[in-house]
Amino acid sequence: MAKHITIPKNFMTIFIVTFFMSNALAITLLPPNDIADRFHNDSETIKIASSDFGHIVQEIPAAVFYPNSIDDIASLVKYAYNNSVPINVAARGQAHSTWGQSLARDGVVVNMTSLENRLNGSGIIVSSDSSLGFYADVGGEQLWIDVLNTTLQYGLSPVSWVDYLYLTVGGTLSNAGISGQSFRFGPQISNVYELDVITGKGEFSTCSPKENSELYYAVLGGLGQFGIITRARVALEPAPKRVKWLRLFYSDFSAFTRDQESLISKNERRDNKALNYLEGMLLLNQGPQDLSFYPVSAYARINSLVTKYGIIYCLEAAKYYYDDRESRVEKELLDLLKGNLGFQPDFMFEKDVTYMEFLNRVRSSELFLRSKGQWEVPHPWLNLFVPESRILDFNSGVLKNIILKQKIPAGIVLIYPMNRNKWDDKMSVVIPDEDVFYVVSMLHSSGFNKWEAYDNQNKEILQFCDDAGIKVKPYLGHYETQEDWINHFGSKWESFRARKALFDPKMILSPGQRIFNNN
Ligand code: FAD
């Protein structure tokens, strides 16, 4: 990342005019003096801001903005809004998007993480009151790992997570923020009491279900289209100490989904006997297997099971516990699992880890891949929400007939169900219209000149679903045309469009989503 440098203001003025003009934007207004030195356009900074974790899309911005405060962001957006040719502005969290969603061609990318140290490190403040209980006020730029580390110091923790914690609060709340806790606690957007937002007019607004509610519901799952989140008030609960973590193998998909659905049917927030987490994944007889969860002594029989069936479905479940409840949690787990679960006998694996080890489980894979130079590579990901009524068709048509048959080395493939009643339909995010739906995440990595093969496979999968009438909804998705987005939002499109007109009438925010400014 480029270092901040202090440059005299008159130099900055000339520099700003030059770089915006050189990017063919008509400048009628210079940025206010107090933010003039926050713009950077050295080649290294521009290069980093032109790409994202996907390493597929490239869009070159005119400048990157390094705010020191929330006021800086408000000034920037006002300036972009008032310019005679409005300037596009994209908040950039960690740019862990995969299809250019945090990029801004010819516009300004806001490096949100430069807010990290604002107000002397007060980006995460833990409090409580009689109506909400415990909560944390968290800057939109904060990483979830930092939220966890801070709240744990108070013996507290958010309840709904993402699998990987080095994502920003503003970035995941703009999508939904899902993981194995969502079946019980809802996605992260269902666990936010209040937000501070800078709208597309540069206006600062605090919003909640009671105050400025239209903005609150628009922004959550709103793909960055309505405002820049600068603070979220996140629900907290007492933090567990340890986690019983299980993996059960299935060769039969119907038994796998039947058991997953039965386990998520016990989902009351306050039901201490319910699971805390449920996901699932595929072990495929193609591409490298990550067996690090399992004892080395089991590798041979796991490999031969996968070879025998070609595809094994792994149900992953976790139950949290507090200080001295290990024996009780063992019994509660056994109670949940006993009976009719249809996993392969002898293929149940268990770990007992700290809460932090469990939540931060993806970090070790990241560090391993980084050490092999396999992290900063193309990621042609496809994430879909699939209606429960068609999940068996999805298995035969997609998992078996496309992914398994084509034998392209597959990345991680996750598959697990969620309960619709844990989501709030007033929010912008779109999910299938069934009580239970599945998340299917095909998280491929590829060489720099090989991602098209995965992209073609992804297109084939979408085409198959379309032809078979399986009404999937992409999550973290991208589309080529506005018509596709209109289809995506379905009955929610009119309110999405109306909210855009209200909060970002000049359509300057998050242009990389290519919803309103698809050129
Ligand atoms: P960015 O990619 O920087 O931004 C995403 C979008 O949000 C952009 O349009 C951007 O303009 C906008 N934006 C960013 N910050 C703000 C803000 N403060 N206010 C308003 N808009 C903003 N997602 C899940 O739900 N569950 C997972 O388990 C999960 N695991 C992941 C694991 C990995 C390894 C990776 C790379 C991604 C994963 N994701 C997961 C996807 C992730 O949630 C999204 O890619 C998210 O956008 C990443 O956050 P970010 O901070 O990098 O956002």
Image (cartoon, rainbow, N blue to C red):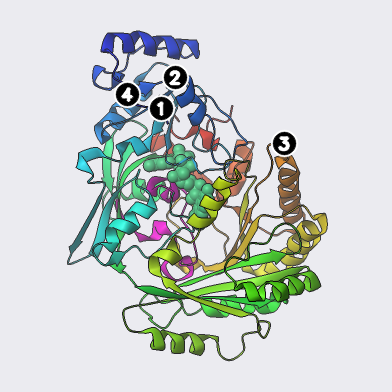
- Mark 2 and mark 3: Cα distance apart in space: 28 Å
| Disc number placed over residue 519 in the picture, else none | none
Q: Are marks 1 and 2 in contact (CB under 8 Å)?
A: yes
Q: Quadrant of residue 39?
A: top left
Q: Amino acid at mark 3?
A: Asn
On the image, numbered disc 2 is attached to which residue? Answer: 42
Left or right: 51 in relation to 285: left
Find the distance from the CA under tag 4 to the CA under tag 2.
12 Å
Q: Which mark is residue 449?
A: 3
Q: Is residue 200 above or below residue 327?
A: above
- Mark 4 belongs to which amino acid? Arg
Identified at 65% across, 80% down, the residue is 347
- Asked if marks 4 and 3 touch (Cβ < 8 Å), the reply is no
Q: Choose mark 4 or mark 3, whichever is in front.
A: 3
Q: Magenta region: which residues? A: 167-194
- Name the side, left or right, on which 129 lies relative to 293: left
State the separation of the CA atoms marked 4 and 3: 36 Å
Secondary structure beneath dot 1 equals: loop
> Callout 2: helix, strand or loop?
loop
Q: Which residue is mark 4?
A: 38
- Residue neighbourhood size for the residue with mark 4, other residues' Cα within 10 Å, grouped as few (<14), some (14–19), many (≥20): many
Q: Position of residue 307 (x, y in %)?
A: 79, 69
